[in-house]
Amino acid sequence: MDQLTELLRLHEIGARATAVEVIFTIFVCFVLQMIIGYTYIRTHKGRFYSQSFVHTMVIVGVVISVIIIVIGSNIARAFSLAGALSIIRFRSAIRDPRDVAFIFFSMGVGLACGSGLFTAAALLTILLSLMIFLLEGTDFGRREDKAKLLKITIPENLNYEGLYDDVLRKFTDESTFLSVRTTSLGTMFELVYSVKIKRGISEKEMLDEVRARNGNLNVSLILDQQMME
């Protein structure tokens, strides 16, 4: 009887210790995930900012840390959780590849916290956040000559083949004919080109010359090709 009481007492102590460890892990992971979320908010420059995405990053990181604690070294639990998580399907498309990197960032910190590697998790969070701020602050990787999209509307009775070749040679270093489609119930064609405009060239001058050939119909120059994706 005394041995059974002693075993129950040791089990309660172990349970309390585990609960304290879980609470501590969740707290530390939450703080680190908030730093990651703050980094994302301050460095985000895209058009599709979502507050729910920031919340999701924080939640996913904390949940991952608890999952790692639950799995521990138990292989059966690992397979069970893998099977349960495999039924989850994410329907929303991620538009910016940078968002994918932040998801892996959040998951990596969560994995480190769940494994008890709090120093590694803190170092990863701080150092990588500083690197992200450095990349954004220096505008690393930007190219001035990136391609733009030129969309031209012409009447359906106008032959579009080679119609603007000479204009594009005059104003651009590089141009590629991407697509053509009918609009306005088949009464118009919409031509789409990828262009790299020459340095020192006036975009207005180019658009004016394009409009002179299409009867002053719609012409648009889209500054970012991602707008078409």
Image (spheres, rainbow, N blue to C red):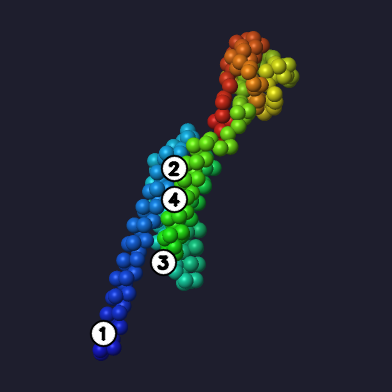
In whole angstroms, how far apart are the C-alphas of marks 1 and 2? 52 Å
Q: What kind of element bears circle 2?
A: helix
Q: Which mark is residue 5?
A: 1
Q: Residues within 10 Å of mark 1 (few under 14, many from 20)?
A: few
Q: Residues within 10 Å of mark 3 (few under 14, many from 20)?
A: some
Dot 1 or dot 2, earlier in sequence: 1
x and y, in percent, of residue 170 in the image: 71, 16
Mark 1 or mark 4, whichever is nearer to me: 4
Give the camera-side residue of 162 and 13.
13
Identify the amino acid type marked 4: Ile
In whole angstroms, how far apart are the C-alphas of marks 1 and 3? 27 Å
Q: Which residue is mark 2?
A: 40
Classify the position of the N terminus by image quarter: bottom left
Q: Which mark is residue 70?
A: 3
Decide: is 226 above or below 163: below
Q: Residues within 10 Å of mark 4 (few under 14, many from 20)?
A: some
**For the residues bearing labels 1 and 2, Cβ distance under 8 angstroms:** no
Decide: is 136 above or below 176: below
Classify the position of the C terminus by image quarter: top right
Dot 1 or dot 4, earlier in sequence: 1
Decide: is 121 above or below 95: below
**For the residues bearing labels 4 and 3, Cβ distance under 8 angstroms:** no
Q: Which residue is mark 4?
A: 126
